[in-house]
């Protein structure tokens, strides 16, 4: 097989760990696979470099930051290549430029436009293990080094896997796969063998933080089979993230995610006329506040209730924005101590009773649900934060996720 293996910052955090990664690579090589490894900077390295720049300047130029930050990944790629050589494996390390990764001109947050796989293909043909510095490319117009935004080396790996039509893209981190829920909350959580792209995206946007959404979206678009697994327990098979069609037995519910970083904003008796919602949400958008759930009821007597949630980080900013709307409503109510519990599963599309089971499970525990919203494969509920763990465990059991 042709495999792209990606190693995150914690997997290459020091020389011992880099040696450990070299063993994972050499083992796969011995099994006969062609390998392109994509690496992150050693953990903490990118932050350290950023700090240097900010000590010297309040506003360093973004193209210089890219030049600086891209060095972190290059250090890892060459070190890994050097260890593998030491064990008589033929390798070649590549910067993003040599690997053919071309991006737009948005320094520090560039998007990949195209990948010229010529060098990659040639070096595979030459029998080399290729080690690519992740997180970087070169700009299309100006031919400068660019970086893809924090956590961007996952994207490099997925994009390369898609461009070169690799059989698999394995993302190595410090967790060994995707679980039915957070094992720190529910020790009976089970690792999933497979999960669809859409379920993974819903879980990630609902608070499960294993994989970056942008890379799962790209994997879906490019049809890349992703595996999430750990470099610390390489013998444990990870979780395959793939097309729904590749999953024969579709579970009704695949996982439960919790997001405690949410604040609920309630507006009571808002004037029920065109333009109010537009004006509220465009003001929030102008401040870059990412609104998550929005619920509005049917108006009575020209008034309606409007509830929405925002990330805790944006709370202060949001309160400022909402000042403007005090006159349009009877009362604005903020609730910081809430959390969002989301139940995700493709099987919901074809099964009934999934939502009612969630509600009755929480009712039995005496947990009041403040907001409910559903999509095709997700049911989200806002409950008081103090009930987060209890709710997750009860739901995990109700849907038999430990079986
Ligand atoms: N080193 C970069 C960061 O820390 C990219 C990555 O690790 O994926 O954000
Ligand atoms: Mg990282």
Image (cartoon, rainbow, N blue to C red):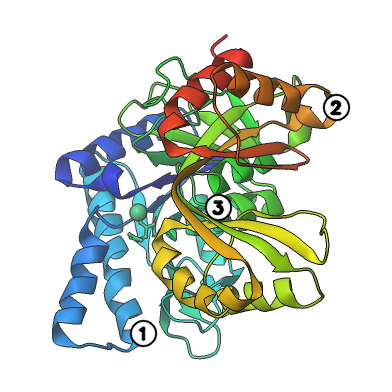
Q: Nearer the viewer, residue 178 or 352?
A: 352
Inspect this view and state whether residue 319 appears.
yes
Find out whether the residues at labels 1 and 2 contact each other: C-beta distance under 8 Å: no
Helix, strand or loop for disc 3: helix
Left or right: 298, with 227 as reference point? right
Q: CA distance from mark 1 to mark 2?
A: 49 Å
In the image, which disc is placed on residue 62?
1
Disc 3 residue lies near ligand 1 with CB under 8 A: no
In the image, which disc is placed on residue 213?
3
Q: CA distance from mark 2 to mark 3?
A: 26 Å
How many residues crowd mark 2 within 10 Å: few (<14), some (14–19), many (20+)? few
Decide which of tag 2 and tag 3 comes sooner along the chain. Answer: 3
Residue appearing at x 49%, y 45% in the figure: 211
Q: Nearer the viewer, residue 22 or 136?
A: 136
Vertical placement of 170 versus 98: above or below? above
Helix, strand or loop for disc 2: helix
Q: Quadrant of ligand 2?
A: bottom left
Vertical placement of 383 versus 43: above or below? above
């Amino acid at each position: 097989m042709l495999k792209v293996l990606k190693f995150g910052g914690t997997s290459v955090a020091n020389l011992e760990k880099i040696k450990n990664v070299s063993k994972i690579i050499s083992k796969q090589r011995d099994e006969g696979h062609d390998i392109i490894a994509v690496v992150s900077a050693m953990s903490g390295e990118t932050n350290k470099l950023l700090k240097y720049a900010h000590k010297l300047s309040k506003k360093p130029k973004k193209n210089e930051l890219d030049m600086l930050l891209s060095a972190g990944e290059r250090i890892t790629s060459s070190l890994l290549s050097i260890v593998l050589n030491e064990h008589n494996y033929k390798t070649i390390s590549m910067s993003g430029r040599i690997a053919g990764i071309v991006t737009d001109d948005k320094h520090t947050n560039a998007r990949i436009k195209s990948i010229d796989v010529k060098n990659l293909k040639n070096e595979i043909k030459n029998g080399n293990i290729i080690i690519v510095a992740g997180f970087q490319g070169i700009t299309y117009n100006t031919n400068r080094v660019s970086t893809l935004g924090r956590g961007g080396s996952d994207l490099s790996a997925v994009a390369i896997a898609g461009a070169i039509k690799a059989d698999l893209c394995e993302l190595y981190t410090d967790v060994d796969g995707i679980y039915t829920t957070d094992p720190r909350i529910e020790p009976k959580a089970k690792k999933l063998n497979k999960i669809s792209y859409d379920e993974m995206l819903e879980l990630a946007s609902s608070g499960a933080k294993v994989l970056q959404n942008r890379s799962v979206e790209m994997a879906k678009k490019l049809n890349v089979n992703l595996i999430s697994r750990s470099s610390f327990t390489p013998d444990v098979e990870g979780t395959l993230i793939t097309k729904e069609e590749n999953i024969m037995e579709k579970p009704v519910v695949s996982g439960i995610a919790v997001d405690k970083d949410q604040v609920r904003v309630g507006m009571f008796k808002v004037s029920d006329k065109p333009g109010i919602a537009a004006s509220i949400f465009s003001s929030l958008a102008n401040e870059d506040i990412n609104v998550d759930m929005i619920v509005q009821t049917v108006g009575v007597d020209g008034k309606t209730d409007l509830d929405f949630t925002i990330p805790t980080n944006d709370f202060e900013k949001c309160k400022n924005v909402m000042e403007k709307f005090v006159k349009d409503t009877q009362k604005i109510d903020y609730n910081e101590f809430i959390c969002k519990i989301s139940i995700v599963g493709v099987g919901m599309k074809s099964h009934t009773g999934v939502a009612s089971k969630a509600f009755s499970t929480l009712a039995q525990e005496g947990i009041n649900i403040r907001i409910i919203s559903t999509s095709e494969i997700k049911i989200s509920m806002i409950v008081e934060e103090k009930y987060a763990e209890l709710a997750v465990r009860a739901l995990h059991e109700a849907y038999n996720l430990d079986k």
